[in-house]
Image: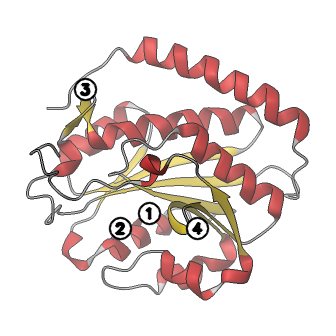
Amino acid sequence: MATTIDDNAADEKSGKSIWRLLNIRCTRIERKWSGDMKLGLIMLAAGNSRRFGSNKLLYGIDGMPMYRHILLELKNVKAALEVQGHRCEITVVTQYEEIAQEAEKLGARFLYNLHPDEGISSSLKIGLGVNREMDACLFTVADQPWLRWETVFGLVDVFLRDGKGIACVEHDGKTGNPCVFSKKYYGELMELSGDVGGKRVVVAHRGDVAVMKVEDGREMVDVDVVFADGRR
């Protein structure tokens, strides 16, 4: 079962952070996006964790299962964007009952990937398939427990301001998750196959990619291996 935390206290703390950030950004950012945006926030959480050696998404990190960190951060991103008048919906793609149940409790839509062995592209296409009406979709993975909602919110800001068709985060010259794709790339994303994610589309369209630099590289770390001291 998932480890529980005091959600009310966490929500209150996060809510204050949201308002501080919005008070700063809403007064100084003139977006190139015309009108309100419909954004799908898609969390991919169906992996088999072969390199980790067990189901890493349920492994406890800082007091709760790994996947729940991202799920709570996306909840904060959704709240912040809706304050600005955007329409957002969180979609979780998973093969695990516990993750699906927790997503439902937090008001997110969940979908099962019955064929996770087909690779991450299968989860990506399942999530995108129910978000085709959205103007853009942000994809994130469930094994980056130190990713902060402010970073994800900032990435959406970059996407809106720069007017590019794609936006992704970067640290020390290396791009990673999360990434945002406008509707014009949905067709290419739906053509992906195997264990290939959206990075292939990013590489193919470098001239249409806005980049947000992340100062703390820990946010982009995905947990795949056992550390030397035995911790995961």
State left or right for residue 137 relative to residue 148: right
Mark toward the viewer: 2 or 3: 3
- Give the quadrant of residue 135: bottom right
Q: Counting residues from the N terminus, which is met first, the one under dot 1 or under dot 3? A: 3
Q: Is residue 132 above or below residue 171?
A: below
Which amino acid, by three-letter code, is at mark 2?
Ser
Q: Which mark is residue 127?
A: 1
Q: Which mark is residue 123?
A: 2
Answer whether residue 52 is visible to the viewer in this image. Answer: yes
The residue under label 4 is 132
Q: Position of residue 38 (x, y in %)?
A: 69, 53
Q: Position of residue 112 (x, y in %)?
A: 28, 58
Q: Which mark is residue 63?
A: 3
**Callout 3 secondary element:** loop
Q: Is residue 144 above or below residue 105?
A: below
Q: For the point 64% across and 44% down, which residue is it?
A: 153
Alpha-carbon span between mark 3 and mark 4: 35 Å
Q: Residues within 10 Å of mark 3 (few under 14, many from 20)?
A: few
